Each structure stands twice: as structure tokens, then as C-alpha cells.
């Protein structure tokens, strides 16, 4: 039940915020929005307000704005239709959904930092997270271990750990560790980080929580969002170039992760929502058919050439895009179910 509720919460927020971006900018630019829907499938609730029908549907895995004249089959001269507006207005409407998904994490992180404080790295030589599948975890190191020495050299702070691992390279290195009242000797061989080319063992420092003022929370939320976006684009680049293995998760995988995170607390579920929102924004801006990025690319070509793409071409592009998204979703769902 918690997984179901967490899934509805996460997808509901992401879809509402994304579609709200399209909706607000469509209204701002004078377009006629015939329906604003959250979810797909049978209607649970609907209400007509002026020219717009607001509806809530049964399957909370998406949503849409039905903007007059946006469907390639709609007449070109549809009153206050999408295609009757200047290309700059259409670009704004197309980009607004993803832009809202960039704004949402800033607001979420601001609220989290203000209400819960912010976790910052400690300088003590104490292990925080030990990532499964990497040398530290494979050798038996655990969260909370205090590193006393590496390669026979005393360790006094976290910088000493980083420097010692960098100096060791990828040869086997002895660690002396304090775990509770016991001292342990552990040997491990660092891996090479494919993103940086430097030795690493798969650990992060322990964290401490500090309270932030509203101004500090505002700066920290923007900085956190910027750093996550930067890392996501770097990871996407490494996946495209084959430096790291691509991992896909479909709706089933995301729902499972939402449930797991929800068990850790509401603040963790909010952080998961923020991360997923940034993923949605970045993926949706890729210049692929049926995505906002692909639609924006078509509009950009129109702005440069002064020529609109024909209806038949637009319909074919959308069909290809929908087929691609459907195929990827089915593949990712299959991986989720067999993982």
C-alpha cells in the first residue's frame, strides 16, 4: 500500500507540474486549452471551467493538455490554435513543461533544507555510505568504520583518505580500521573511476546535519540542483559514449524505488521526487521525435527557414516517436520484472 501511495504521489506531482508549465504558457500566449488532464484512461473526476475541461483520470502515469490546433490533423486556421501563434510562443509552450521540472527540485530542496536541515560531509576519517559492488564493500568495509591508516601511513581526516587512495593507484593496499572496540586489518585494490580516470574504492564520508537560514537554504537548493543536473548530463554522456553501462527503469522500477524510499521517510521521498523531476526534464529535452526536445527542434528549423513542416511529415514523426517511446517502455518494464 505504501508503494502504491508513494507512486501516486511522485507521478502525480511530476505530471501536474510538467503539464502545468504547458498549460500556463499556453494561456499566457492566448492559445485555447480545451482540456487539462492528469492521468490517462477512464475519468475519475471532471469539471468544465470556461473553455477548459479539467479532468483526473485513473492511471497516474502521465497527463496532457489538449491545446486547440496542436494535433497535426487539426485545421491550420483553428481559432486561437497552437499553429496560428508565432513560433516564439510555440517554443515557449513546448519548453515550459521541462522548465517547470527544473524549477520543482529547487523548491523541494529549499523546503527540505529549511525544515530538516542540510547534511554536509564531516572531515573525520569515518566512512559514510559504502557502495555495493565496489572494492570497499567487497573487502568488508562498512559504514561507520574509522580508518586508522592506509598503506602503513596514519590517517587523520578525510583528505588523508583521498590522498592515500590516489597515491596507491590500483595495487593492493592494506587498511587498518577501527570498528567499535575492535581493530581490523583489511586489504583492497582500488578500481579506476570511468568518469574521472582516478582510483576509487566506492565510499563517501560520514555526514552531519546543520540547520540553514532561509537565504542559506535558497542558495543551497539552487547549488544542489545545479550539481545534480551537471552530474546527470555527465552520466548521460558517459552512457552514450559507452564508458558506463546504461541502466533503464520503467514505471515498475520507478514505483518499486518510490516505495523503498518512502519507507525511509517523507524527506527522502521528496528528494527522490526532485531527482526524478530532473531526470524527466533532461530526457524530455532530448531532440527525439514525440519528446518536447524533438518538437522544439522542429520549431527551431521553422524559425530558421521560415517554413512549417507539413502535416503528413509531422504525423509520421509523431508515429515514429510514439513507437520508440513505447518500445523503450516495454523493454524497461521487462527488465524491471526480470531484475
Image (cartoon, grey):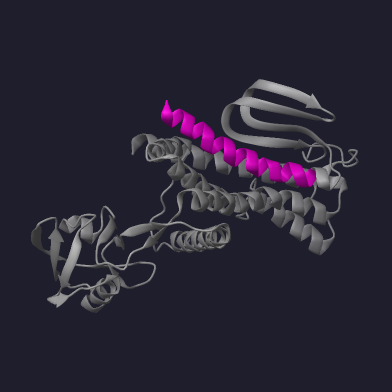
The picture places residue 312, in percent across and down from the top left corner, at 76, 43
- Label the magenta part by its dominant secondary structure: helix
129 relative to 255, above or below: below
Is residue 282 found left or right of 20 in the rendered image? left
Taking the spot 45% from the left edge, 53% from the top edge, the residue there is 117
149 relative to 177, above or below: below
The picture places residue 294, in percent across and down from the top left corner, at 66, 52
Taking the spot 51% from the left edge, 47% from the top edge, the residue there is 276
Q: Nearer the viewer, residue 194 or 219?
A: 219
The picture places residue 232, in percent across and down from the top left corner, at 49, 59
Residue 249 visible somewhere in the drawing: no
The range drawn in magenta is 1-26
The quarter of the image holding the C terminus is top left
Residue 256 visible somewhere in the drawing: yes
Instruction: Find out whether residue 301 is within the magenta segment.
Output: no
Taking the spot 63% from the left edge, 25% from the top edge, the residue there is 57
The quarter of the image holding the N terminus is top left
Is residue 29 found left or right of 96 in the rendered image? right
Q: Nearer the viewer, residue 87 or 320?
A: 87
The picture places residue 214, in percent across and down from the top left corner, at 57, 57
Amino acid at each position: 500500500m505504501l508503494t502504491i501511495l508513494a507512486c501516486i504521489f511522485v507521478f502525480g506531482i511530476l505530471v501536474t507540474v510538467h503539464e502545468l508549465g504547458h498549460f500556463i504558457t499556453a494561456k499566457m500566449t492566448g492559445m485555447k486549452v480545451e482540456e487539462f488532464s492528469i492521468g490517462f484512461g477512464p475519468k475519475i473526476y471532471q469539471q468544465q471551467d470556461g473553455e477548459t475541461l479539467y479532468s483526473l483520470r485513473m492511471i497516474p502515469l502521465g497527463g496532457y493538455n489538449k491545446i486547440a490546433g496542436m494535433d497535426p490533423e487539426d485545421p491550420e486556421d483553428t481559432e486561437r490554435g497552437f499553429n496560428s501563434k508565432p513560433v516564439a510562443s510555440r517554443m515557449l509552450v513546448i519548453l515550459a513543461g521541462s522548465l517547470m521540472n527544473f524549477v520543482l527540485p529547487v523548491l523541494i530542496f529549499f523546503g527540505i533544507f529549511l525544515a530538516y536541515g542540510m547534511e554536509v560531509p564531516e572531515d573525520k576519517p569515518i566512512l559514510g555510505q559504502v557502495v555495493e559492488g565496489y572494492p570497499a564493500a567487497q573487502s568488508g568495509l562498512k559504514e561507520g568504520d574509522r580508518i586508522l591508516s592506509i598503506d602503513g601511513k596514519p590517517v587523520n581526516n578525510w583528505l588523508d583518505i583521498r590522498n592515500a587512495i590516489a597515491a596507491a593507484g590500483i595495487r593492493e593496499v592494506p587498511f587498518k580500521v577501527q570498528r567499535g572496540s575492535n581493530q581490523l586489518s583489511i586489504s583492497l585494490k582500488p578500481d579506476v573511476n570511468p568518469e574521472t580516470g582516478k582510483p576509487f574504492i566506492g565510499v563517501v564520508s560520514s555526514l552531519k546535519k546543520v540547520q540553514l537560514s532561509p537565504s542559506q537554504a535558497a542558495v543551497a537548493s539552487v547549488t544542489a540542483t545545479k550539481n545534480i543536473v551537471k552530474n546527470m548530463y555527465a552520466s548521460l554522456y558517459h552512457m552514450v559514449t559507452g564508458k558506463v553501462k546504461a541502466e533503464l527503469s520503467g514505471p515498475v522500477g520507478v514505483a518499486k524505488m518510490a516505495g523503498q524510499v518512502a519507507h525511509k521517510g517523507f524527506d527522502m521521498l521528496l528528494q527522490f521526487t526532485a531527482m526524478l523531476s530532473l531526470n524527466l526534464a533532461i530526457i524530455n529535452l532530448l531532440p527525439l521525435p514525440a519528446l518536447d526536445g524533438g518538437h522544439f527542434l522542429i520549431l527551431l528549423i521553422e524559425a530558421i527557414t521560415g517554413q512549417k513542416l507539413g502535416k503528413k511529415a509531422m504525423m509520421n514523426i509523431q508515429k515514429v516517436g510514439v513507437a520508440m517511446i513505447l518500445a523503450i517502455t516495454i523493454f524497461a518494464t521487462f527488465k524491471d520484472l526480470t531484475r
